[in-house]
Amino acid sequence: MTLDLVQNADLLKEDVSRPFSSERFNMRRLPVLVGRVPIESIGNHPSSLDMLIKLPGGPLCLPEPYASCDGVGRFLVACLAREDALLPGWRKTHHLYLTFDRREVQPGGTHRNEGWHFDGMQGARYPDKLNACHQYVLSTHLPTEYASHPVDASGLDDLRHDWFRELGSQIPEATPVFRPAPGEICLMSAYQMHRSPLAGPQDGGWRTFIRLDVSLKEQDRAGNTLNPDLPAPWEFVPRSLPEGLQTPVRDAGWERGEKFV
Ligand SMILES: [Fe+2]
């Protein structure tokens, strides 16, 4: 898969410096490689979902057991260094949210929700779009797959369309897929189509997925993991897609994994 790496990095910088815009899905892109964490340095910790670990202008507040984990520390050091280069001033403006998701993947199944999608949708709740979210992602096994194929989001409505289904269906079955190595950190913007890979017959097993979301949003969805060391200054509320756009989640079962509380 060939892509001008300098052009690709410039595109990502533009992505995160401008308000979310459906037009930017129509550009060929791949994530930027940030570094690599030895997967043996990542502990077998319970799972957390979009846990607030930094408020704009505040310090990083990472609770145990993540705070003492060598692998999580290496991951964050690499991400923060990259973020300082990508978006000077972000520490005063953006939130950080950590997902640490460790579950057992069954052959023929996926760890996280199946199918092409993107992270960082700004739907009807954000009539005035914020600068796009971006995420640092690594997996210890069955790394996340990325498609460079451009997709057309023009005409999609926040309330009437399932954006993941509409955009995912535009990616050909045989599209080239980029797969980083286990432990490699990928930086992607909200316009990057990606998916949790299907485990082959011999590929089942434990998989840890780590994501650092850098966002202007207050992620207040009920069910997100609460940080005992950093209470969020907002109420958590149930959020769901509009009626008729809800599709069943196909993954390894969030309820089945050990969770951080
Ligand atoms: Fe995702």
Image (cartoon, rainbow, N blue to C red):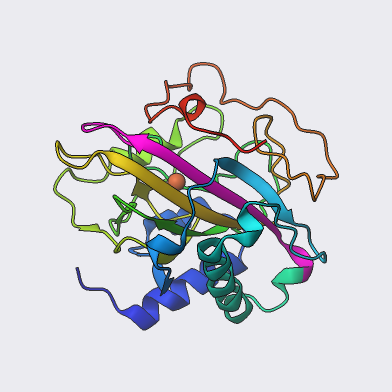
Q: Quadrant of the C terminus?
A: top right
Residue 93 part of the magenta-drawn span: yes
Q: Which residue is at the far right?
A: 233
Question: Is 39 displayed left or right of 44 in the figure?
Answer: left
Residue 130 part of the magenta-drawn span: no
Query: Residue 30 in the image: x percent, y percent?
Result: 35, 64
Front one among 239 and 183: 183
Specify whether residue 247 is in view: yes
- Among the 4 quarters of the image, the one containing residue 113: top left
Residue at 60%, 25% (x, y): give it.
240
Question: What residue range appears in magenta?
Answer: 92-111
Count of labels in the image: 0
Front one among 66 and 161: 66
Residue at 33%, 63% (x, y): give it.
28
Query: Residue 140 in the image: x percent, y percent?
Result: 36, 55
Residue at 42%, 48% (x, y): give it.
208
Q: Is residue 226 above or below residue 58?
A: above
